Image: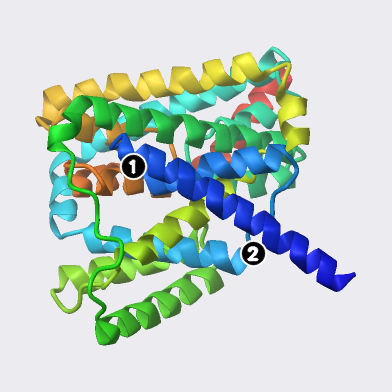
Amino acid sequence: MRSSEATVRVMRWALLAALSLLLAWGLEEMRLPAAFLIGPLVAGILVRLAEMAPKVPRPAFLASQAVVGAMLGSALTPSIVATFRADWPILLGTVAVIVAAAGLSGFLLSRFGVLPGTTGVWGASPGAASAMVIQAAAHGADVSLVAFMQYLRVLFVASGASVTARLWIGVEAMPPPPVIFPPLHPGPLALTLAIVAVAAGLGIVSRIPSGAMLGPLLAGAVLHGADVFVFDLPTWLLIAAYAGVGWTIGLGFTRSAVAHAARALPWIVLSILFLMAVAAGLSVVLVERLGVDPLTAYLATSPGGMDTVAIIAASTPVDVSFVLALQAVRFFVLVGIGPWLSRRVAAWSSKS
């Protein structure tokens, strides 16, 4: 019996891996950024809806987040602090508009009964998905619908940002395909993995939302900024991490959640497109006021997860520090006031 169950698990993982590689290869051939994130994400959705999906072990997902955090930390430079200090009113104003637009969207979804209770409020929060799902569960919202809304928005934003980047800069300006198996440097790689593991462990123990990602991110930023050590992250390791993140998001699209959301799906999609349109409008403001290039501004304001947007930014010729600056500010604002704001909007919608 155990042998049969093990065989089924192996076959499901083989199916998921093969489909992910096929989709990622197709997207890579189209020169779309973040192919190794979007391919596994879409593959995860397909096998989950076909009820043939394995489950990504939590340690594997945390390890994927840690590696992505290390990649983000390596991309951060002291210039990100200078960027924030010079332009903080516009950056905070941009974050405030996105958060307000999300709050309005969630309020309308709940107020007009499109979604039950306060589900729309928690599901519309633009980022910090795991924190919002946990808070939603604590306040009686439909957790499966909240997760569905969060992951659907990530899918829309990641796909939209990837296609926009590809169309905007063209094939000629795209960086060449990465060397998947570069020369191995055992010493720096071992030290990198040790630092990332310790930093991720401290982030998890601290119970900070997304601590597994933020710990290595901060460690990488400090070490890189002080010119002490630069993480050695070979392409094959990053691809594995991207797949772990993509699978976790894709496998969150359960049949029950999709069926539950079927009636409200047009309105959920409309709310996502509204939020993306607001973010795109804000990117125009950033281009006019700060002089950043349009693609950098678009990725910086995109209301998806910081990890997914950063993966796309890292594979395109944009100002990654600026993108991460705005994404990080929004993330910390949402972690700090998002639950309180969502509770307030939920209370208003229930009284209206």
Q: Does the rendering let one see residue 334? A: no
- Residues packed near mark 2 inside 10 Å, few (<14), some (14 to 19) or many (20 plus): few
Residue holding disc 1? 28
Sequence order check: which comes first, mark 1 or mark 2?
Answer: 1
In the picture shown, does residue 184 fall above or below 273? below
* Residue farthest right in this picture: 1
Left or right of 191: which side holds 270?
Answer: right
Quadrant the C terminus occupies: top right
- SS class, disc 1: helix
**Residue 166 locus on image (x, y percent):** 26, 31
The label number, if any, that marks residue 57 in the structure image = 2
* Residue farthest bottom in this picture: 187
**Residue 263 locus on image (x, y percent):** 73, 16
Instruction: Name the residue at 68% across, 55% down.
Output: 12
Instruction: Name the residue at 51% across, 31% down.
Output: 153
In the picture shown, does residue 346 fall above or below 242? above
Quadrant the N terminus occupies: bottom right
**Residue 14 locus on image (x, y percent):** 61, 57
Left or right of 333: which side holds 2?
Answer: right
Name the amino acid type tagged 1: Glu
**Residue 226 locus on image (x, y percent):** 15, 73
Name the amino acid type tagged 2: Pro
In the picture shown, does residue 90 fall above or below 214? above
